[in-house]
Amino acid sequence: METPNYIKSLLMPNGRKPAGRRVWSIDLELIWLPFLTATNVMGDTRIPHEALGAPLRLAYDADGSVKFSKTGRPITKVAKDLSDTIRMVRENFTAGLLSYANGVITKRATDYKGMIELANKAGQPIVTRDKANLEQALIRQMEEAVAKATDTPPTTKIPEGKVAIPA
């Protein structure tokens, strides 16, 4: 089985960094709107023109008043037609990823199993180090809480910062 070009292209860095409102972590103005407009042009979608022309809308409370965040800013939302289409693209995208992975698992089961074993073995020292650092941090937190509650200094000295466990 050969990896399709569209999968290879997903794994290539392109250097672009989105800067605006994001939907599904993808820039709405620079990516979604041109893509969805193109799908309308090609007849693949029928997204209403007003959704493409005014993709961000004010959010309203149940009583019809404008909704504000706790910081006092008005809340905006993405037009329903756009968000529904983007949700469908996301669902189809994840289904495609799973289908590709399933095809590799089915056709190259031994290689896939070997890759999983290599990854687990390579990750084990990191898991061990993180577990030890977490345990020490929790001990430090408990001792500091007890010391604060009883107004006495902690009894155990635990070094500050990360503790490296040899691999």
Image (cartoon, rainbow, N blue to C red):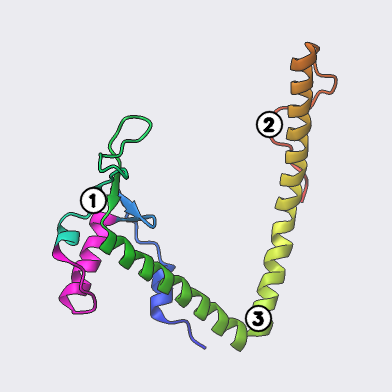
The reply to whether residue 108 is visible in this rendering is yes
Tell me the distance, in whole angstroms, between the alpha carbons under discs 1 and 3. Answer: 47 Å
Q: Of helix, strand and loop, which one carries label 2? A: loop
- N-terminal-most mark, 3 or 2: 3
What's the magenta bit mostly, secondary-structure-wise? Answer: helix
Identify the amino acid type marked 3.
Answer: Asp
Residue 90 at x, y percent in the picture: 40, 67
Give the number of the disc on residue 56: 1
Check disc 2 and give the amino acid type: Gly
Task: Indicate the secondary structure of the residue bearing disc 3.
Answer: helix
Is residue 36 located in the magenta-colored stretch of the structure?
yes
The residue depicted at 31 percent of the width and 43 percent of the height is: 61
Question: Residue 113: x and y, percent?
Answer: 69, 77
x%, y% of residue 145? 74, 22
Q: Which residue is mark 2?
A: 161
Image height check: is 156 above or below 8?
Answer: above
How many discs appear? Answer: 3
Left or right: 142 as drawn, with respect to 99 = right
